[in-house]
Image: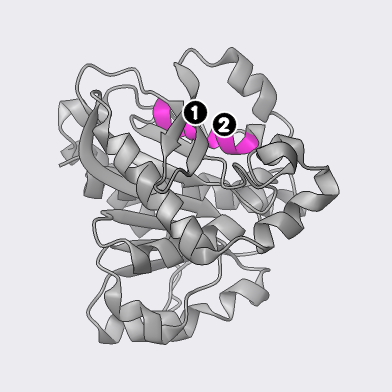
Amino acid sequence: MTYSFPDLRLRPRATLLAGFMSLMLLPHSATLGMAQSLPADGATATARLEASPRHGEWVWYDAGGGDRVQAWVTYPERSDPAPVVVVIHDIRAMSDWARAVGDQLAADGFIAVTPDLLSGKGPGGGGTASFASNEVGRAIRDLDPAEVNRRLRAAAEYGTSLPAATNRVGVVGFCWGGSTSFAFAVDYGDLDAAVVYYGTSPPTEALSSIRAPVLGLYGGADNRVNSTIPAAQAELERLGKRYEVNIYDGAGHGFLGRQSGRDGANRAASEGAWPATISFFRELLEQ
């Protein structure tokens, strides 16, 4: 089941109908390369990447002051310029799963830029791959939020500067990346859309600077995160800003990467959340 604050009324039929109607109203260019698939889960990400027909490549972009960030960029197969989505990885940092999310976004029609936010932070100036696996989470927690936002701004600017891109840009993040996506919407005034997967909300006093609409997608069995939703929702409603909240009954934290978990609830949540993500991005970025 899917429900939304503030009235908590169940509305699966309304959600499906709205998604169908938004699809029917899309211009032809926005439907090119559409896919019905979900992103890979953690167990199938590597195989999905290896089998992908889409062009993906490693790049380095300049984040200012001599700071260079490595990113995986995936291109959609379409005949017209594509909007950009910056993918913020979870606390496991750069992984095949994060790259596979970018690949699915490309399958759905977007240029996906997935930066390794541990670039330059590891031994010998390396990124995620240079860390021992048990050190990655701590390294992510030690990142300076201001530096992360600077790197994300540069990723957005790099993406929209590509010849194949439009000037429209969104961001999506997961877990730590979900919190970071919400915080980036606070920081970056040129952002057009932000999607938060199971990430905590910023302090209410910071929310007045948000300009981009925000979509929050949460597991019902994740109260550590969900307890931060009501204050943010009340403040954004007071400010007249768009914040849509979908909570998926029974799903746990990290449901999109753990689709086989919680007796089918994580899969059901993924089947609701990913189409909602794509519909949200198409509405706001395909203009």
Dot 2 falls on a residue whose secondary structure is helix
Neighbor class of circle 2 (other Cα within 10 Å; few <14, some 14-19, many 20+) is: many
Question: What's drawn in magenta, residue-wise?
Answer: 97-107
Q: Quadrant of the C terminus?
A: top left
Instruction: Classify residue 272 as left or right of residue 32.
Output: right
Q: Amino acid at mark 2?
A: Ala
The residue where tag 1 is placed is 103
Q: CA distance from mark 2 to mark 1?
A: 5 Å
Relative to residue 161, is residue 174 drawn left or right? right
Question: Whole-percent x and y of residue 28?
Answer: 17, 26
Residue name at image x 72 percent, y 35 percent: 129
The three-letter code of the residue at mark 1 reads Asp
Q: Which residue is mark 2?
A: 100
In this picture, is 251 found above or below 282?
Answer: below
Magenta: main secondary structure: helix
Seen in the picture, residue 276 relative to 233 is either above or below; the reply is above
Q: Residue 131, how many percent across, how many down?
A: 77, 42
Q: Quadrant of residue 126?
A: top right
173 lies left or right of 35? right
Residue 53, how many percent across, how many down?
48, 12
- Please say if the residues under marks 2 and 1 sit with CB atoms less than 8 Å apart: yes
